[in-house]
Image: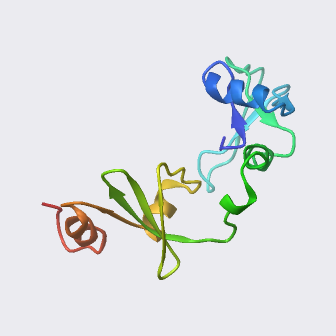
Amino acid sequence: MGPSWYWPHMQPAIAELVEELGLAAFCQNSDGDVIFERMSREAAQRYRGVVQDQQSMRLVGGTSSLVRALARDLPAERIRLKARVTAMALLPKGVELTIGDAESLTVGHVIAALPPRLLEATTRFIHEGGSRERERKREGGGKAK
């Protein structure tokens, strides 16, 4: 299961946020058998009568409904669409973002909405005393020192 599901008992902060924002959610259907495929070259296996311990939930409208709800209270000038962050530099009092090739913006917090591997592959991470070592390691030039 991926980011479309959440478990209220295991992720109470998400459940509280969903409630606070007034978002509609529904229980993930768990009736019936489970069919599990371990590898593509093996036949799928059927498991009868499997019951989930913790009920998973989904948001009506998908996870984008959560993003839209969070964005609705932000000032319009603070929302940047299609702005690709190419680097993040950790500063003593915040994070400097490089947007595209040259534009920069300093912020207090960053929430990355990409899978970690994709974020690491598309964004340079810079911090004092460590940027060269990190870049060398990413480029396959040996161990970071």
Task: Compare residues 130 and 105 and report the one nearer the observer.
Answer: 105
Residue 100 vs 121, above or below: the answer is: below
List the single residue furthest toward the bottom. 101
* Count of number-bearing discs: 0
Task: Compare residues 74 and 19 and report the one nearer the observer.
Answer: 74
Q: Residue at x 71, y 21 (%)?
A: 52
Q: Residue at x 20, y 66 (%)?
A: 133
List the single residue furthest toward the left. 145
* Residue 5, image x, y percentages: 71, 37
Question: In which quarter of the view is residue 16 placed?
Answer: top right
* Residue 96, image x, y percentages: 42, 63
* Residue 131, image x, y percentages: 25, 66
Residue 64 vs 19, above or below: the answer is: below
* Residue 36, image x, y percentages: 68, 39
Image quarter hosting the N terminus:
top right
Q: Residue at x 81, y 27 (%)?
A: 30
Q: Residue at x 61, y 56 (%)?
A: 41
In the image: residue 16, left or right of residue 141: right
Image quarter hosting the C terminus:
bottom left
In the image: residue 113, left or right of residue 65: left
Colour mode of the rendering: rainbow
Task: Compare residues 70 and 4 and report the one nearer the observer.
Answer: 70
